[in-house]
Amino acid sequence: MKTETITIPKVEYKFLLEEVGILRNPKLAEAIAESDKAKSKGVKTWSLKV
């Protein structure tokens, strides 16, 4: 398999690292799934603004 290098802005890289960290954390992933389930039932949930 050939390795390919790409260049992205540092801000975007930090954002992607944070996203991966969140998804790898079982408790946070469970909380996100629970929030999505609540939204589908019409419950108003918190909205994070980054």
Image (cartoon, rainbow, N blue to C red):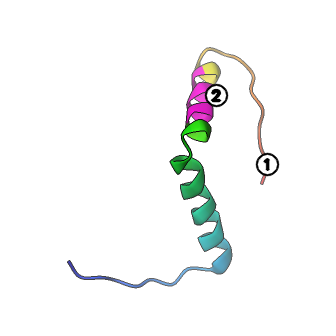
Q: Is residue 48 left or right of residue 29?
A: right
Quadrant for residue 11, please give it: bottom right
Give amino acid for label 1: Lys
* Residue annotated with mark 2: 35
Q: Earlier in the sequence, mark 1 or mark 2?
A: 2
The mark lying in front, picked from 1 and 2, is 2
**Residue shown at 54% from the left, 40% from the top:** 26
Q: Nearer the viewer, residue 24 or 2?
A: 24
Image coords of residue 14 (percent x, y): 64, 70
**Residue shown at 64% from the left, 64% from the top:** 15
Above or below, comparing residue 24 to residue 33 in the picture: below
Residue sticking out furthest to the top: 41
Q: Is residue 40 left or right of residue 5?
A: right
Determine whether the residue tagged by mark 1 lies in a helix, strand or loop: loop
Quadrant for residue 50, please give it: bottom right
Give amino acid for label 2: Ser
Tag 2: Cα neighbours inside 10 Å, few (<14), some, or many (≥20)? some
Residue 2 lies in the magenta stretch? no
Above or below, comparing residue 39 to residue 24 in the picture: above
Image coords of residue 6 (percent x, y): 44, 83
Residue 49's label in the rendered image is: 1
Q: Nearer the viewer, residue 9 or 29?
A: 29
Image coords of residue 22 (percent x, y): 60, 50
How far is mark 1 from mark 2, CA to CA? Answer: 16 Å
| Most frequent secondary structure within the magenta stretch | helix
| Image: magenta residue range | 30-37
Q: Nearer the viewer, residue 17 or 6?
A: 17
Residue 31's label in the rendered image is: none
Residue sticking out furthest to the left: 1
Quarter of the N terminus within the rendering = bottom left
**Residue shown at 78% from the left, 32% from the top:** 46
Tag 1: Cα neighbours inside 10 Å, few (<14), some, or many (≥20)? few
